Image (tube, rainbow, N blue to C red):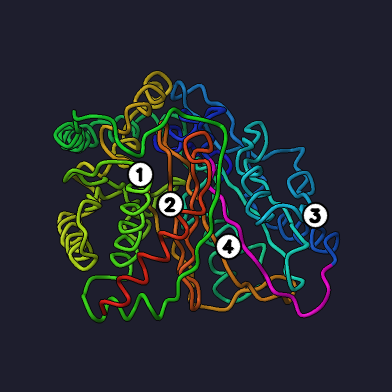
Amino acid sequence: MPGRQLSGLDIAFLCLEGRATPMHMGAVVTFRPGAPVNEDRLASLLAERAARVPRLRLRIGSTLFPPGGATWVEDTRFDPADHIHVHRLSEFCVEDPLTAYAAGWIEESLDLDRPPWSLHVVTGLPEGRFALLLKLHHAFTDGAGAFAVAAGLLDELPITRALLEATEPQPESRSPLELLRDGIATAITDAGKGAGIASAILRAARPYPTSPLSAPSSASRRLGFVRLDVADIRKIRAAHGGTVNDVILAVLTGALRDWLVNRGQRLDGRGVRALVPVSTRARDTGPAANQLSGYLCDLPVHLEDPVRRLREIHQSMHRNKAAGPLSGPGAVPVLAGRIPPPVHRIATRAAGQVAGLLFDIVITNVPLPKLELGLDGASLEEVYPLVPLAPRHALGVAAAVYRDGVHIGLQANGDAVADTGSLRDAVLKSAAALYQSA
């Protein structure tokens, strides 16, 4: 991707970056080795593999045209070892040392003067297991693209090789004059489409009081990890209909209801609105690192019956899918991709502060292959994705279905949420209630 310009959406993630709003995604991945782990060997192996992934050598460079734009350039000083760190857990007085360590790790912003990624090897887990903590800036890629890049670090399989080849950078073949011509043509074409999305966003904006999930932005983070059984989710789906993602959203809705009530929040008939990111990679073959849209889904936290909650979510998501991902108020990422870089540089940070008028929480589902993955012969057991917090949001949720588990990563504003334990318990309780109704 050297010479490839960042899209409007890529630029938007850069503009939202701040000390209290780091715009990187993360994943905490655990492995079960068959023999004792040598962390230095693992770090060397990962550095060797990272050196063979072209995308991981790229940093962000500025451009003269368009003004305020940016491009991917190769970092001539790149050394993968600079991005890889080793840590052995020893905090025996901490209830969950991996989660505590990962919370401190996810707080730290990435250095945007070099390739925007970081990898930590963490050993000292029970039963000889170890973890990889990977974070990538959202300007670098979206969730689906993140796994494609990470595939190059894992033991090679046909699918991981194919994913890695799909991410290899292609040089920009257009001349500056062609870029200018194509940019003007695209801007004219996108103007009408963008106006339609903007109009839908304005109609969907809510002028009512502050969301129960809003909070002043903070650099502090709290994390929580929850695992559900895929078999239980499928049983719920078979009994009540909908998709696996609908069931996961319903489980999270029930958890949010219980958690908010226990925090003294009045629900009084009002839902919590989620922005559910949607990949457009199958529809868009362009070079942009982020190929995303989104759906808005009102989570009926005011409903006591878990089955009614699931049915309402299914109906809402069905309406979204019928309308398609490239229009409607949830298509905020699409609109961002159509805004010129200079406008992002001026207005995006301010616009991000009022995201709560449109949605209260981001809930994303990261697609993973249905294959057994591993690293240096150790089998991959769990993968907990982490989505960055939008400005003034207290909570973000990411899920990934891998093998027989649904792995849910909770990321909370540490100043607004003192502990994620009650929310983790609420997720398990909500899943059990739906399972018992099946």
Of the residues shown, which amino acid type is indicated by label 4? Leu
The CA span between labels 4 and 3 is: 35 Å
Of the residues shown, which amino acid type is indicated by label 2? Val
Tell me the number on the disc at residue 164.
4
> For mark 3, does the 10 Å Cα neighbourhood hold few (<14), some (14 to 19), or many (20 or more) residues?
few
Callout 1 touching callout 4 (CB < 8 Å) = no
The CA span between labels 3 and 2 is: 28 Å
Q: Secondary structure at mark 1?
A: strand
Callout 1 touching callout 2 (CB < 8 Å) = yes
Q: Secondary structure at mark 3?
A: loop
**Relative horizontal placement of residue 417, taking residue 128 as reference (left or right):** left
Callout 2 touching callout 4 (CB < 8 Å) = no
> For mark 4, does the 10 Å Cα neighbourhood hold few (<14), some (14 to 19), or many (20 or more) residues?
many
The residue where tag 1 is placed is 361
Is 369 colored magenta in this rendering?
Answer: no
Magenta residues (range): 24-37
| Residue under the image location 70 percent in, 74 percent down | 32
The residue where tag 3 is placed is 90
Where is residue 57 drawn, in percent x and y? Answer: 67, 46
Question: Which mark sits nearer the N-terminus, 3 or 1?
Answer: 3
The CA span between labels 1 and 2 is: 8 Å
The CA span between labels 2 and 4 is: 26 Å
Q: Secondary structure at mark 4?
A: helix
**Vertical side of 9 occupied by 124: above or below:** below
Q: Quadrant of the C terminus?
A: bottom left
Q: Is residue 37 or residue 256 the one in the foreground?
A: 256
Where is residue 270 drawn, in percent x and y? Answer: 19, 43
Where is residue 393 drawn, in percent x and y? Answer: 40, 36
The residue where tag 2 is placed is 397
Of the residues shown, which amino acid type is indicated by label 3? Ser
Res 355 → quadrant = top left
